[in-house]
Image (cartoon, grey):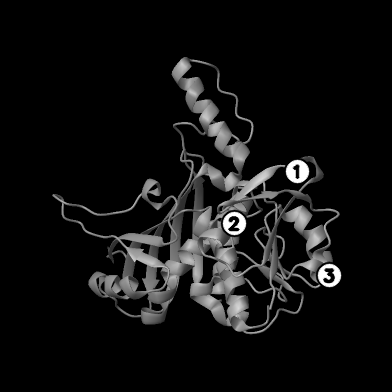
Amino acid sequence: MPRNIAVLGATGAVGAEMLTILAERLFPADTVHALASRQSMGRELSYGDRTLKVKDADTFDYSTVDIVLMSAGGDLSKAMAPKIAKAGALVIDNSSAWRMDPDVPLVVPEVNADQLNARPKKNIIANPNCSTIQTVVALKPIHDAAGIVRASVATYQSTSGGGKDAMDELWTQTRAIYVNDPIEPQHFPKQIAFNVIPKIDVFMEDGSTKEEWKMTVETKKILDPKIKLFATCARVPVFVGHCVAAHLDLERELSPEDARNILREAPGLMLVDRADEDDPAFVTPVESVGEFATFVSRVRSDPTVENGLAMWIVSDNLRKGAALNAVQIAEGCVNAGWV
């Protein structure tokens, strides 16, 4: 059966990564279309060893494709996703527009692949927030083994989570510091170079940011509504790769060694954890770039609670945090036989 796929927002960082991963994983598509705004028409993008010419997303005939991987922002998704879905294409959307819609599955295949057993009512599947994805991949096997009552997490998120302009601002400000030019924040509320900003997205009435709210409500929807999660999300001067420090309050005791054994066998995870001072092993954002896995390091007991466990979680946010997860969802739909 011929299968055709389109990537909407193909000229962005995540869209380009989607094309790369589709090619790397040999996604079973007969035709792949790269779509973006009219201004990008004719621009050439790489797809494996082939070159695709960008087509106009507004005039494209979506009835000719089976799946649309969408990474074009929430406002555009709200306007276009229902029309694309009505044309017959399954939409896998990377924005926050549909994540909390009760009729739209929010999917991380290693955690809740059962959501792909049937075609969704609205013909839309949501890709979760980047930090949520890597967090729930690591929390899932621990929750299955010992039950997570509460999770307190702090994120250290790279500038690529804010898109190309955010990455460019880090580069520009870093250079400016070295040549003694003035620093003028534009994308970020404060200087990002050589700094940490404890604000991602807008502030809400309770003092949390929307990014922190996303992590809380999305974890409940994906993993377990009973889990209590509190997050503090910060932007750090890193180009690619998000980190999460997670402190867990468990229902049952779970030793660090038992936790490591469980994590070592869990899908999508790679355990890199050795505390030997002469030969330590842990993962930083630099090592995660270009990798499919979510990495876990520094697994240890948290003695401040009765059954406490702590871990350090790192992932390439453009890959598992966005593009890879979307492609995995598409693969799951194909394997389920309804695309």
Q: Nearer the viewer, residue 317 or 33?
A: 33
For residue 184, above or below residue 295: above
N-terminal label among 2 and 1:
2
Q: Residue at x 48, y 46 (%)?
A: 240
- Tell me, yes or no, whether the two marked residues, 3 and 2, touch with CB atoms within 8 Å: no
Image quarter of the C terminus: bottom right
Q: Secondary structure at mark 1?
A: loop
Name the amino acid, label 2: Met
> Which one is earlier in the sequence, the residue at label 3 or at label 2?
2
Q: Residues within 10 Å of mark 2 (few under 14, many from 20)?
A: many
Query: What residue is disc 2 on?
Result: 18
> Would you say the residues marked 2 and 1 are in contact, meaning their CB atoms lie under 8 Å apart?
no
SS category of the residue bearing label 3: loop
Q: Position of residue 19 (x, y in %)?
A: 60, 55
Is residue 131 visible in the rendered structure shown here? no
Q: Give the alpha-carbon distance from disc 1 to disc 3, as whole Å.
A: 24 Å
Q: Is residue 199 left or right of residue 85?
A: left
The disc labelled 1 sits on which kind of residue?
Answer: Gly
In the rendered image, which residue does mark 3 sit on? 87
Secondary structure of residue under mark 2: helix
The residue identified by callout 1 is: 42
Query: Which residue is found at the position 32% from the left and 67% from the top?
Result: 309
Instruction: From the top left corner, tell me how far across and down residue 7 is, in percent.
Output: 68, 57
The image shows residue 62, relative to residue 223, as above or below, that is above
Residue 179, position in %: x, y? 47, 16
Type of amino acid at the residue the image marks with label 3: Ala
Distance between mark 3 and mark 2 Cα atoms = 22 Å
Which residue: 50% across, 66% down? Answer: 229
